[in-house]
Image (cartoon, rainbow, N blue to C red):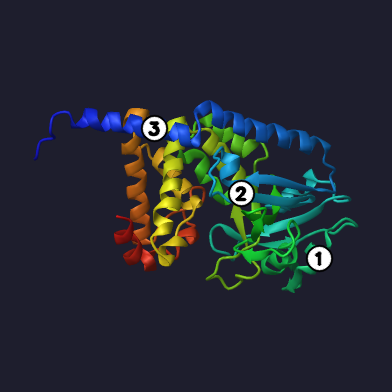
Amino acid sequence: MESVPPGTFEEMQQLSESVYYGLCEKLGTSQQVAIRRETKDIKELVVSRARRHDESTERVSGSRREGFRLKSSDLDCMLWLNNHRVIMDMSQFEFYNIANTTLILSDSSGSPPGFALLRLLTQTRTTDSDVLDACFKMNNRVYISSSMYRQLTCSSAFPNSIVHGPCGSGIVAGKEYDTAWCFACDFWPSFATSWIDRGVSWPDSEVVHEIVNCKSGCHFVAIGHPLAPHANEEWRISFSLAEYKLVSSMNHCQFLTYGLLKLFLKEIINQQSEETSELLCSYHLKTVVFWVMQQNTLHHWCPQNFLVGFWVCFKLLLKWVYEGVGPNFFIPQNNVSFQNLRCNAKQFVPTVI
C-alpha cells in the first residue's frame, strides 16, 4: 500500500480550517445564523398569535428560513388555510370542531410511497371556494384535485405567476419566488413511523420528540407522482417543518457543509450546461447531508475535518445520480425526487468531476 507523504494530513486539516472560516465569512457564523433563524421564528410566532382561524398561514421556507442569505436564493413560501385540516384516519375526527373546520382525509392506499389522494370529508360556510372548485367525484366520494387546486391558487400570492412544480413562480423586485399553497396536517403519518426509531447517532431523541409530538406534522403540496395513475389528483407529502428542525439541530460544520454543497450546485454544476442545470436542487443536497449524518459516516464534524465531510457527502450524491436511487429521508421507499437523474448521469458525472 502506498504510504501517505509526511505532512499531508496536517496540510489537509489546515486547508479544511481555512475553507471553514472562509465560509463563515461568506455564509455566516454560528451566531449570525442563529440570529437569522430566531428573528424569523419570533416574527412568525407574533403573527400567528394575531391570526384568526379563518385566515391563512404564510411561512417562509427554503434557504432563507434555514439561515442562509445567498444572493442567488429564491424566495420560498408555503401557504395554507388554517380552517382546513388533513387527518390521517377517522379516529382523528374528534380533535376538531367541524362547525368551523373543513376536514380532509388522506388516502394513500393506492398511491406510491410519499403521495396520497385527499378526500373532502366536511364542508362549512367557510370552506374555501378554490377547494370546492378543485373537487371531483370518484367512486361516489369527493376528492380534491392537486392539479386543479394548483392552477386555481397559482397567482393568489403574486399576480401572473406561472406553475412550476407544486408552486406558483415568477420574479418580483428582481427576485425569483416560489409560493406553494398546501394543506396542513397536525399528525405524523403512520407510514413514516419507522423514521422515529431509525436514528441512533442523529438526530437525538429530543429533536425526534419535538418533530413527532409537537404538531409539526406534515403538509400536502399540490403535485402528484408523474408515473402514477392519478398523477393529476394526488398530493405529495412534505416534511418541511421537520426538515427545518433537523437543519437547526446541525452543528455549524455540518450546516456549512450543506452550504458548500449549495454553492457548488449554483456556481459550478448549474453553470456547466443546460442539461445539468435542472437535474439537482437544494432538496437533494439536504437529503444527502441528512443520510450521511444519520449513518454516522463521519464521526467528527469539525473544522479540521471539513473537506472530508464535504467529500463524503459529494460521493454519496454522485452515487445517487449514477444509480438513480436517492431515498427520501423520512420515507425511504419514495425515490421520486431522483427519478430523472439516472438517465442523465452520463452527462452529469463526467462534467462535474
In the picture, residue 253 is in which quadrant? top left
Q: Which amino acid, by three-letter code, is at mark 3? A: Tyr
Residue beneath the point at 36% across and 34% down: 19
Q: Which residue is mark 2?
A: 189
Quadrant in the rendering for residue 24? top left
Residue 17 placement, left or right of 102? left
Q: Nearer the viewer, residue 30 or 274?
A: 274
Q: Amino acid at mark 2?
A: Pro
Sequence-earlier tag: 1 or 3 = 3
In front: 17, or 94? 17
Q: Residue at x 43, y 35 (%)?
A: 23
Compared with residue 172, is residue 24 higher up or lower down, i.e. above or below?
above
Question: Quick check: 351 left or right of 49?
Answer: left
Where residue 290 sits in the image (x, y, percent)?
45, 42
Is residue 297 visible in this depiction of the protein? no
Relative side of 166 to 24, left or right = right
| Nearer mark to the viewer, of 2 and 3 | 3
Amino acid carrying label 1: it is: Leu
Give how far apart the Cα atoms at labels 1 and 3 are: 52 Å
Q: Provide the residue designation for mark 3.
A: 20
Q: Secondary structure at mark 1?
A: helix
Circle nearer the N terminus (1, 2): 1
Mark 3 surroundings within 10 Å by alpha-carbon count, few (fewer than 14), some (14 through 19), many (20 or more): many
How far separated are the C-alphas under marks 1 and 2? Answer: 25 Å
Instruction: Indicate the quadrant where residue 154 lies.
Output: bottom right
Residues packed near mark 2 inside 10 Å, few (<14), some (14 to 19) or many (20 plus): some
Q: Earlier in the sequence, mark 2 or mark 3?
A: 3
Q: Residue at x 49, y 36 (%)?
A: 27
Mark drawn on residue 132: 1
Percent from the top left, x then y, of residue 306?
35, 34
